[in-house]
Amino acid sequence: MDKAWWKESVVYQIYPRSFCDSNGDGIGDLNGIISKLEYLKELGVDVIWLSPVYQSPNDDNGYDISDYKAIMTEFGTMEDYDRMLARAHELGIKIMMDLVVNHTSDEHAWFVESRKSKESPYRDYYIWRDEKDGKEPNNWGGCFGGSAWKYDEGTGQFYLHLFSPKQPDLNWENPQVRKEVFNMMTWWCDKGIDGFRMDVISLISKRPGLPDGPAGKSGYGDPGCANGPHVHEYLQEMNQEVLSKYDLITVGECSGVTVEEAKKYASVEGKELNMVFQFEHMDLDGGESFKWNHKKIRLTELKKVMSKWQTELYGKAWNSLYWCNHDQPRMLSRIGNDSGKYREVCAKMLGTCLHMMQGTPYIYQGEELGMTNYPFTSLEEFRDIESINAYHELTEKGVVSKEDMFDYISYKGRDNSRTPMQWDESPQAGFTSGTPWIAVNPNYKEINAAEQMSREDSVFRYYQKLIKLRKEHEIIVYGDYTLLLPDSEEIYAYVRSCKKQKLLVVCCFTKKETVYELPQEFSRQSGKVLVSNYGRRSVEETLILAPYEAAAILY
């Protein structure tokens, strides 16, 4: 398997609005990030993925960009950005930007011009259509509720927005649009950035003719834009024009991606991207079809999905590994146990399970502390457009009761991951000296970076060790993967193999003491425990696993 620095790296995602506020306005900013770079250096991460910091009216927290070459005023200036980039590079940390090019803001200069008249040279930068039978051009629904079409009084046509009405979709069929995007990417690469995480990149090629889709619970049709007919062609062009000219890390957020499609996006031939984010494991409790529920993910189903991606991409494409990001609730609260007694051992177990797999691991801010979901008590506490819109749309249509819907958005809503980073036990968790844009989780006095960095058995120190092990053992990065005990609902066990070494990883997903018999090939050998969340030093033929125990044993 070809070696590459991005295969051996660990990526840390920063959600700038919630990371660290340097000026007391309650909003995280670039100078706040600069002040915490040494913290990330101590953790040991190699790359920072920065959620969008571009100029934006913030309808969708920065994923609606009005100027790709300017910094959001609330976050600082381009001088601040340059200083942050330089300091990160001094510390040996790379910066990966969030590339949002399926859509822009409706306040972007291109769209402002596009909507002025049908004759505008920018008209074809976006997707405009006439009404059909006195209503929208088709039945597509937007990801944030309602129709995916917005009527524009000025020109008497509708424009397409797969997300918010303030996020009109770009028309990638127009070569000039692609040229503009590639020029902008080149501008950032020349500035010295190290890669791109590409937002909803699998949606950029729409279905020919924009036909109606099958209607879901909301009554609207599924746009079915994932993995469209020209998406690989567009990404190969992007690779030729931009990506291949720099030494970058690239990952595509690919909604609806299959293993077969991933082999095209992230092929070892390197014609498109380095890797993709897939969502199959995130969809096991409802996910993209209908996420609003309280369903729990079954371990057997989780193992089946994770193992499929591990084995079927091996040697053909590269995996990305993640439990959490800005669009998901905290995984510790979702599939783990976030109660006081088990919170830390469970957070360490989840970290072990993921970081010992093959692929590039992604840590979302606060995951290395074992941060948890927020205890919402009212709708007024939410800030996320998706949760708020879904609550109103589904309760008003009578699809879900108000009580159940509040329970669902509290459990699955994106704001769970967007509460401020918990730095210390001072007011507002040391995130800001002002009033935070979204409330701080009240458990910050128990869960914070300062307390964890002072303690050798903390989640932070454990993540530090997981990252260090990946640097020291080639088998963790490049070894193959074999699942054990596929039918167990208590234990996730797998073996990594590389050259003459084997790594046995055993993770207990229950609060009950569980018995695990070592496979025969390991029972008579002496293995070295690389990492254990209970401090296990030796391995017997029969392991009595404590609640949420995890161990990685090298043979």
Image: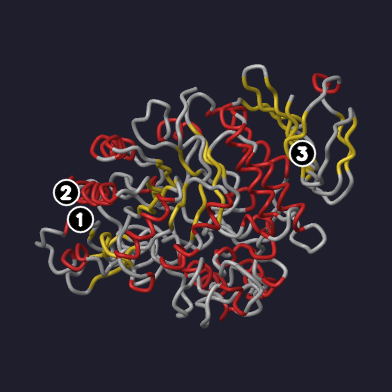
Reading the chain from its start, which is encountered first: label 3 or label 2? Answer: 2
Mark linked to residue 125: 1
Of residues 6 and 179, the one drawn nearer to the viewer in this rendering: 6
* Dot 3 amino acid type: Ala
Q: How far apart, in angstroms, are the residues tagged by discs 3 and 2?
A: 53 Å
Image position, residue 291 (x, y; %): 58, 58
Mark 3 or 1, nearer chain start: 1
Mark 1 element type: helix
Q: For the residue carrying disc 3, how many other residues have a C-alpha within 10 Å: few (<14), some (14-19), or many (20+)?
A: many
Q: Mark 2 points at which residue?
A: 176
Contact, CB < 8 Å: mark 3 with mark 2? no
Screen quadrant of the C terminus: top right
Residue 521, how many percent across, how many down?
A: 80, 19
Contact between marks 2 and 1 (CB within 8 A): the answer is yes
Question: Is label 3 in a helix, a strand or a loop?
Answer: strand
Q: Which residue is located at x 34 percent, y 61 percent?
A: 81
Q: What residue does disc 3 label?
A: 551
Residue 129, above or below 320: below
Is the Cβ of the residue at disc 3 closer than 8 Å to that at disc 1?
A: no
Give the vertical position of 493 relative to 392 (above or below).
above
Residue found 83% across the figure and 37% down from its top: 537
Name the mark on residue 20: none
Which residue is drawn at the image coordinates 62% and 21% (left, top)?
A: 498
- For the residue marked with disc 1, what is the amino acid? Tyr
Mark 2 or mark 1, whichever is nearer to me: 2
Q: Distance between the residues labelled 3 and 1?
A: 53 Å
Residue ID at (49%, 37%): 258
Q: Position of residue 13 (x, y in %)?
A: 50, 54
